[in-house]
Image: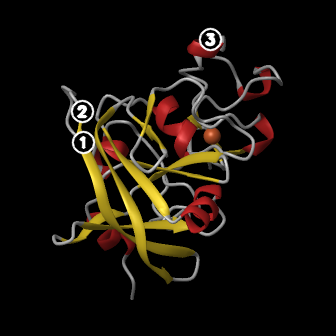
């Protein structure tokens, strides 16, 4: 017996892990970020081996973590959570600072950040656990609280992409209603609501959405959607 609901009882935050190697920068959303020991201050992160950020952290041996605030909306999270840095400039519309280790660090929608040097790596199959000693950290002036994973799901209605540490397939997914769900990020198109922010009025049937419309969260086309049954 393996009840997936117990995994959903585990608490996490929402973070943006960034790094820079050989002149390339990338960043991604991660929920698995945690302090390992106090002295020296050390944190761990778990990154999917398929992700560009994983490749670059392995090369550079350094990473930064920005703590995402509750002010972050889904398009912001989607840029770092559901798009690939190989094809998207994730840093185009956001503020960053260059940290002490030379990495871009996201400060938009962040309550603070830290920079770490990798001291240990552990191959855990689909992911690698990078352990890093924190060499710099700064709290940012921010009125919002750090976003928890529960807030992301319950308030932002965020989904868990397939490369996440916590992906549990389609177990527990909502069903029915003639809706269409993005297979990449989990965004659901509901004809009753439309997508007015992108010129699709409420009441527009799926078949009537222009072919050029893309997922408002992750940017893939209609072919990446499946009907919710
Ligand atoms: Fe999507």
Please say if the residues under marks 2 and 1 sit with CB atoms less than 8 Å apart: yes
Q: Would you place residue 228 above or below residue 190 in this image? A: below
Q: Which residue is mark 1?
A: 138
Cβ of mark 1 under 8 Å from ligand 1: the answer is no
Q: Would you place residue 85 above or below residue 38 in this image? A: above
Q: Which residue is mark 2?
A: 140
For the residue carrying disc 1, how many other residues have a C-alpha within 10 Å: few (<14), some (14-19), or many (20+)?
few
Location of ligand 1 given as a quarter of the image = top right
For the residue carrying disc 2, how many other residues have a C-alpha within 10 Å: few (<14), some (14-19), or many (20+)?
some
Residue at image point 55% right, 55% down: 161
Report whether 134 appears left or right of 222: left
Q: Which residue is mark 3?
A: 201
Residue 114 location, x and y as percent?
31, 50
Residue 8 location, x and y as percent?
33, 64
Dot 2 or dot 3: first in sequence order is: 2
From this viewpoint, is residue 202 visible? Answer: no
Name the mark nearer the viewer: 2 or 3.
2
Q: Regarding mark 2 in the picture, which secondary structure is present there? A: loop
Name the mark nearer the viewer: 3 or 1.
1
Which quadrant holds residue 44? bottom left
Dot 3 or dot 1: first in sequence order is: 1
**Distance between the alpha carbons at the discs numbered 2 and 1:** 6 Å
Q: Regarding mark 1 in the picture, which secondary structure is present there? A: strand
Which quadrant holds residue 206? top right
Report whether 224 appears left or right of 118: right
Comparing 150 with 163, the one in front is 163
Residue 127 location, x and y as percent?
54, 73
């Amino acid at each position: 017996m393996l009840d997936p609901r117990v995994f959903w009882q585990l608490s996490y935050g929402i973070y943006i892990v960034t790094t820079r190697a050989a002149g390339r920068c990338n960043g991604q959303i991660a929920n698995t970020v945690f302090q390992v020991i106090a002295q020296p201050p050390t944190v761990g992160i778990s990154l999917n081996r398929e992700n560009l950020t994983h490749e670059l952290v392995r090369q550079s041996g350094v990473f930064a973590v920005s703590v995402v605030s509750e002010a972050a909306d889904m398009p912001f999270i989607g840029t770092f959570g559901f798009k690939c840095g190989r094809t998207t400039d994730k840093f185009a519309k956001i503020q960053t600072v260059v940290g002490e280790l030379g990495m871009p660090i996201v400060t938009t929608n962040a309550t603070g950040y830290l920079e770490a040097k990798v001291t240990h790596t552990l191959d855990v199959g689909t992911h690698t656990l990078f352990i890093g000693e924190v060499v710099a950290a700064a709290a940012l002036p921010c009125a919002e609280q750090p976003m928890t994973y529960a807030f992301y799901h319950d308030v932002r209605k965020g989904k868990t992409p397939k490369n996440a540490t916590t992906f549990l397939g389609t177990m527990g997914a909502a069903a029915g209603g003639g809706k269409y769900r993005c297979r990449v990020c989990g965004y659901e198109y509901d004809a009753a609501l439309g997508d007015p922010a992108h010129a699709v009025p409420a009441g527009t049937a799926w078949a009537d959405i222009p072919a050029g419309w893309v997922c408002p969260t992750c940017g893939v086309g209609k072919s990446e959607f499946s009907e919710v049954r």
